Image: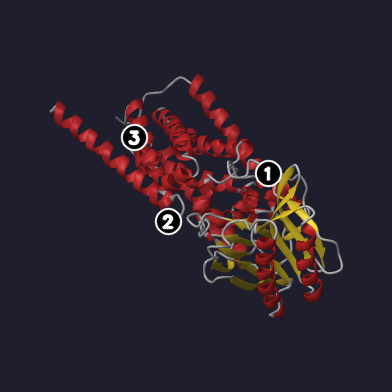
Amino acid sequence: MAFARNLKRILIALLVIAATAVLVYFGDGLNPVWPLMWFAPLPVLWFAAHSSWWEAAIAAYVAWLLGFLNMYHYFHLLDSLWFRVYPFVALLVTIGVLLFRLMVRRRAAWNALVAFPAVWVSFEYLLNRTTSGGTAGSLAYTQLHFLPFLQLASITGPWGMSFLMLLFPSAIAIWIHLRKSDPGPARRVLVLTIALLSAVLGFGAARLSEPPPDHEANVGLIASDQSDNVDTASAGPDAERLLRAYAEVAQNLAAEGAQILVLPEKIAVAADPGTASVDAIFQSLAEKTGATIVVGLLHVVPPDKYNEARVYTSGAAPLSYDKEHMLPPFESNLKPGVTRTLLRKPSGTWGVAICKDMDFTQLSRSYGQADTGLMLVPAWDFNLDRSWHGHIAVMRGVENGFSIVRVAKNGYLTVSDDRGRIVAETRSDAAPFATLIAAVPTVHDETLYLKWGDWFAWLTVGILAVSLLRALFTRPEASAGS
């Protein structure tokens, strides 16, 4: 009998691990199936509620580590980064599950409800503030296609989205475990969670139904993935040849009505005093067409190198923006920028950033505080991450009330509005020179996140602190369940 019971328990544990691993594998990662992440933690949380702490720990750690294999190939390309990141992330998940287990077995239903989300979101926020990854690991990005839910970012940033996603399976697990032994709290926890989610989705639906603003601009996007154009063209004849090819395509888009033309990140090297030849090409084009042109360059000003976006407008000297957030190790030799670049136009204020800059909430929020209605973003992705990393920027627009024009080599040419809707999009390998023209709103929209910042992240840190204090100093009650 003992053997049969042990075998049954082992089989249940294996099924739980497999279920959560599969849900995480397909619900997160480079191409997530967004509904799956709402249920991914549920098998492990259910198992933890009636298991020993070490059984719960093993199940949680193994399940999430297996699920995170969805990112193995991608991060293995980045200097074997997977091995340095995901075992630690799985450990954080395990801590969250164990805190949930402790609270639910003490019948502290409300503390159990917030325990797992508080651990995870506090971790997400710490990463955003202290590492080069910014918000890239946030679970909120799995929900970019769930537009009503995405609108929550305009209030809480990504933190509220991740919190509510993990609150939902926590509530179900609590209800399952306590519905017989403590039905009142179990029912209230579930009802409150469903009511909160309903309110969030109602807010999102109302926000999406608002009419679009009147002011728009026609944007033209250009990128080339031709084999000889994929890397940054070296200074001199190679750079001039490629830039003139881009300029020819840009002139054709301007003739079709594009008022803003955006090219990718680091198209070519421009070494002082060689920027004069680059400026001559695009400044003359701006004067001829009246368009604003943004060009990504690797600008060498000995002894420094900058990942730069140069901005050309008719009747004005070129402006520049230097990328602030570099991608290690590939850009560790580049000097980060420290200033914003803003263009005041009749249709609104336009801002400039570059690729990875959009992974960070602080930089985009500073542009939002300057009433920016449109962000122009040269970029360069890795093909494999064209959807995941290419669309992270979309959430910055929802948070801070601006549209985004993002143009990536080895990625997507994407135009999105301040509700996170993809206005237009095409792949950069769709043609030798892939192009896209779209009309995009340029009016800034005030958001609560813009006014209050990371208030919800700090609230979550406070909730976690209270949960830990309760775990340390509250005497346990009789355990519920087996």
Q: Is any part of residue 181 visible from this angle?
A: no
Q: Secondary structure at mark 2?
A: loop
- Mark 1: amino acid: Leu
Determine the image quadrant of residue 434: bottom right
Q: Residues within 10 Å of mark 2 (few under 14, many from 20)?
A: some
The CA span between labels 1 and 3 is 43 Å
| In the depicted structure, whether residue 99 falls above or below residue 388 | above
Q: Name the residue tied to disc 2.
A: 33
Q: Which residue is mark 3?
A: 59
**Residue at image location 80% in from the left, 58% down from the top:** 319
Given residues 153 and 377, the one toward you in this image is 377
N-term-proximal mark, 2 vs 1: 2
Q: Secondary structure at mark 1?
A: loop
Residue kind at label 2, given as amino acid type: Val
Pointers 1 and 3 in contact (CB under 8 A)? Answer: no
Q: Name above or below for residue 141 compared with residue 405.
A: above
Question: What colour scheme was applied to this rendering of the protein?
Answer: secondary structure
Q: In terms of depth relative to the viewer, which is nearer, 1 or 198?
A: 1
- Sequence-first tag of 1 and 3: 3
Mark 1 crowd level (few <14, some 14–19, many ≥20, 10 Å Cα): many
The residue beneath circle 1 is 334
Q: CA distance from mark 2 to mark 3?
A: 23 Å
Asked if 416 appears above or below 155 in the picture, the reply is below
Where residue 244 appears, as percent x and y from the top left, is 69, 69
